[in-house]
Image: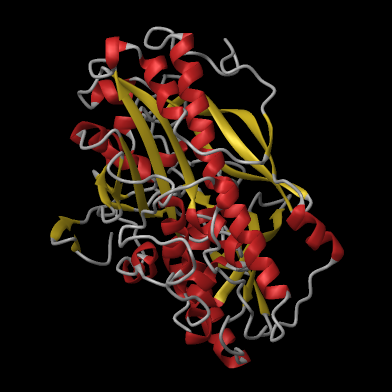
Amino acid sequence: MPELPTLTFKYKTYLTDSWTNIPRSILKALPRRLHLQPSHPIFLTRRLIESHFPKPTYKHYNNLPPNVSVAQNFDSLGFPHDHPGRSRTDTYYINRSTVLRTHTSAHQVDTFARNHSPGFLISADVYRRDAIDRSHYPIFHQMEGARMWDRQKVPDGDIAKAVYKDLATLPTHSMQVSDPNPTTHPERNPLQSSHHSPEEVEALAAHLKRSIELVVADIFTQARLSSLSTTTNPSSSSTATPTEENQAEEPLQIRWIEAYFPFTSPSWELEVFWQGSWLELLGCGIVSQNLPITAGVPSQIGWAFGLGLERIAMLLFGIPDIRLFWSTDERFLNQFSELKDSGLEVDDDGNSAGGAVQNVKNWGFKQFIPFSKYPSSSRDVSFWLAGSSSSASTTTNSTSTTTTTTNNTTSPNTPSPSPSPPPPIHENDVLEIIRDIGGDLVEDAKMIDEFRHQTTGRTSFSYRVVYRSLERTLRNREVNDLHRKVREMLVQRLGVELR
């Protein structure tokens, strides 16, 4: 049962129940909302991207509450009832019918229904039970954008003509673009033929891709300028290599890859060639027409994209560990200042006057300079699964674990069933305990061994936990105390037997 009988979000109180699984560490972090904190790298990254989607064409939503219904988060988007994302092992449940949003798409149908503007951006903190390492965190920030055209409002109902007219107003760029595949493909990337014509989708895809390319060109131009400003700074210990200097002068290379997403078709991923390898940056596509139909605006069609702000901020500012975004250490926060006289003026909502990307101004971003590298301290924990036998197992990948129950009837030739074994343990259950006890002092946690006893059939797992503070040296006594609490909580919550 949950620790608290009720949970309050945005002045709305919910009764908890057997589905409630939000730990104290997540509840404590809920008010932080890094994308709204001026001078924070997440905030600055959001502002940079928003400057390419100006008002009034695009309305910006940055203050939507994180508590959403299961219907908003899953049902409105067509998630199957057995989708892994619905599992308590993947999602934080406030109660059976309410969750902490797992993506900004939870607000998509509602925003279409408001119909306040042709386009919109949604930026928000999102929550998922996830791995523990330097690039994953249970709270991160997404941005979602969409642009729609209405058949009842464009001249003569000609969507393609209206979209191409808008496309002609967009700036150009000098990136090298690889896009070898046709816009649609019957099997790989199908047209929504009952709702869209090929001509409409060709126009929408062109507008979508140009809009995204302009953002990407700016992001990586700023990343290059940021890197060069650091390597040429006399106070910096870094120096630019010939390869880095040549790379700064070469055109950026990007490529469009066919993809699948539940909410768009056709769909694409965008990859950027950066520092010697291809980096997946975002996903996008033509909006599934079921969404505007559900929202009550069936005459509208358009495109949408989604991206993670942490991934882009780590590139822009050279931040090596995702935990740093949550640091309150002034040595981190003081390295980033609010945009002022950097040449590209923006208003309080992050909008700019626009302009061709090849003439983009320098936002003045700088690479993060580590203030110290503190030593790590590793501890292992091994345990037998409670009641483990050949019929019990632990799920150790991202696939959801679902527990099914059978009826109590038996056939005449079937012996009475023995008591059911305990529900299997998902790896995220183990990681959640480690994260809840160790917080941001845990740098990494992974399963390092799995053992099944040949005689008893019992199953054992071993995990290695790496403790490292980003701000100070951890003492062995402190680490030992944290790890002891982890071991105790594994027994208390999961019923395991320590080895």
Toward the viewer: 486 or 289? 289
Viewer-proximal residue, 306 or 376? 306
Residue 40 in the figure: left or right of residue 409: right
Apparent side of residue 152 relative to residue 34 in the rendered image (left or right): left
* Position in image of residue 152 (x %, y %): 23, 15
> Is 151 on the left or on the right of 312, as rendered?
left
Q: How is the image coloured?
A: secondary structure
Of residues 489 and 52, the one drawn nearer to the viewer in this rendering: 52
Q: Position of residue 176 (x, y in %)?
A: 70, 37
At 69% from the left edge and 55% from the top edge, which residue is drawn? 450
> Is the residue 375 above or below the residue 184 in the image?
below
Which residue: 21% across, 33% down? 115
Q: Is residue 309 visible?
A: yes
The answer to whether residue 222 is left or right of residue 24 is: right
Residue located 81% across and 57% down the image? 246
- Where residue 230 sits: x, y (%)? 67, 74
Q: Position of residue 499 (x, y in %)?
A: 63, 69
The quadrant in which the N terminus is found is bottom left
**Can I make out residue 395 in this image?**
no
Residue 87 picture quarter: top left
Q: Which residue, as the protein is rendered here, is positioned at the far right?
A: 242
Q: Is residue 4 above or below residue 388?
A: below
